[in-house]
Image (cartoon, helix red, strand yellow):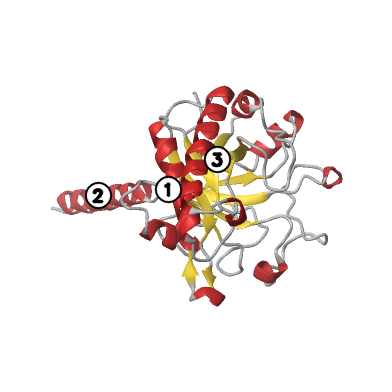
Amino acid sequence: MRRSIWAFVILALASRELIFSQSSNNTPSTYLGFDRNTYPGDANLKALHETFSYTGYWLNNPPAEHTNTWAGHRAAVESAGLGFLVLFNGRVYAELKSVANAKRVGASDAQDAAAAARREGFPAHTIIFLDQEQGGRMLPEQKAYIYAWVDAITAAGFRAGIYCSSIATKDDGNVVTAEDIRHSAGGRHIVYWAINDACPPAPGCAFPKAPPSPAQSGVSFAEVWQFAQSPQRRDVAGHCTNYSRDANCYPPGVSPAQQLHVDVNTATSPDPSRGRLH
């Protein structure tokens, strides 16, 4: 009789352990990544991979830059073990002029982005994120540009993503840019990379072993969350206390003398753009 009881206890404990294991396996994993406007150099990739699973990768000139130093380095990045956040720098409102022009420019820019992605060796269905720097409620010209870009990227055999704010705009009815874009997307499938560097919810310039979920960014549907920027935005991230004295965010494992500051992200995949070949 005692043997039967102990057998039952052992079986019950084993069942509980199996259930716990299955529950743990079903918990979504998160992965830390970085992005920056200028290429960090081949020599730094190995050290950066000690902390990060993926990196941003620009297809055209990043904001305020006159050249794209990332061009031609896709193979080196993948060889170092890093995944990708593939980025295309979009237009600001002043460049769009009218809805009709915005649609034309959006489609043309998408063709340029697709051509650059192919030239860099990214496979079909790679997610290309449109960098939407301006926040708040999107005006008709901005939405026309974004959706024309999304449609043309999809038609070119890639997937569309967008980098945009998930911070409520206090002087614009508390509108959240990501929600505003998604609400008017008309059924288009867009992957969202949210920016929210306010502390909280952001941890500031931090490199946690278990990064927070992108859903904590302020929009539950985000698949990527940029939670730290270099330099620190004092008007938004002023409550963050762990940036360096020069207001930048420097990763571990790289000499501070290199001034290799980064923006820090968390994602639901170690290759958020699905840009790796292997």
Residue 107 vs residue 260: left or right?
left
Residue picked out by circle 2: 15
- Where on the picture, by quarter, is residue 47? top right
For mark 2, does the 10 Å Cα neighbourhood hold few (<14), some (14 to 19), or many (20 or more) residues?
A: few
Could you say which disc has been placed on residue 274 in the image? none
Q: Nearer the viewer, residue 265 or 92?
A: 92
Q: Amino acid at mark 3?
A: Leu
> Mark 3 and 1 residues: CB-CB less than 8 Å, in contact?
no
Residue picked out by circle 1: 147
- Find the distance from the CA under tag 3 to the CA under tag 1: 20 Å
- Find the distance from the CA under tag 3 to the CA under tag 2: 40 Å
> Mark 1 and 2 residues: CB-CB less than 8 Å, in contact?
no
Where residue 61 appears, as percent x and y from the top left, is 67, 39
For mark 1, does the 10 Å Cα neighbourhood hold few (<14), some (14 to 19), or many (20 or more) residues?
A: many
Could you say which disc has been placed on residue 85 in the image? 3
Select label 3 or label 1 by which is in front.
Answer: 1
Residue 10 vs residue 24: left or right?
left
Q: Amino acid at mark 2?
A: Ser
Q: Amino acid at mark 1?
A: Tyr
SS for callout 3? strand
